Image (spheres, rainbow, N blue to C red):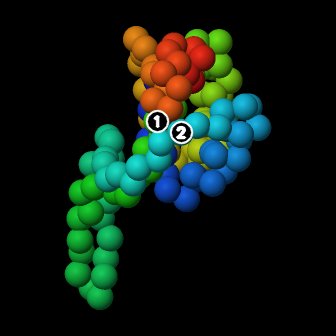
Amino acid sequence: MKAIIAIIRPEKLEKVKENLVRVGCYGMTVTEAKGRGRQLGIRESYRGKEYHIDLLPKTRLEIIVNDNKVEEVVDAIVKSAQTGDIGDGKIFILPVEDVIRIRTGERGEKAV
């Protein structure tokens, strides 16, 4: 099993969710986040005064999938979150040792 952590633009969340459902991925945890990458934030002007916005709003998705679904889920996220501009986000893939469904006590792939 793998944990897929995706950091995306907030406005892309609905499209990403739709595409994840299309590939059979229903469970996820979504968190509002702030962050920055290589661009180190942005500069904006308001009423003639320049401001540096260091941390930009992002959305963090956490998804646990069986190994055979990883590429399909990652492709769905990339295709629906990509704009081609700086700040599209990142996807991290991590191994998961075990999953336990609290309601039933099921473990492993059955619990995903």
Q: Which mark, by number, is residue 62? A: 1
Q: Which element type, helix, strand or loop, lies under badge 2?
A: loop
Q: Looking at the picture, tell me which residue is in the foreground, 6 or 31.
A: 31
Give x and y (percent) for residue 78.
Answer: 61, 35
Q: Is residue 26 above or below residue 30?
A: above
Give x and y (percent) for residue 41.
Answer: 29, 54
Residue type at tag 2: Met
Residue type at tag 1: Glu
Residue drawn at point x = 43 percent, y = 14 percent = 98
Q: Is residue 91 visible?
A: no
Residue drawn at point x = 31 percent, y = 76 percent = 45
Q: Is residue 49 visible?
A: yes
Instruction: Please tell me which of labels 1 and 2 falls first in the chain.
Output: 2
**Number of callouts in the render?**
2
Give x and y (percent) for residue 58.
Answer: 41, 52
Which residue bears the numbered disc 2? 28
Q: Is residue 9 above or below residue 106?
A: below
Q: Which element type, helix, strand or loop, lies under badge 1?
A: strand
Residue 43 image-quadrant placement? bottom left
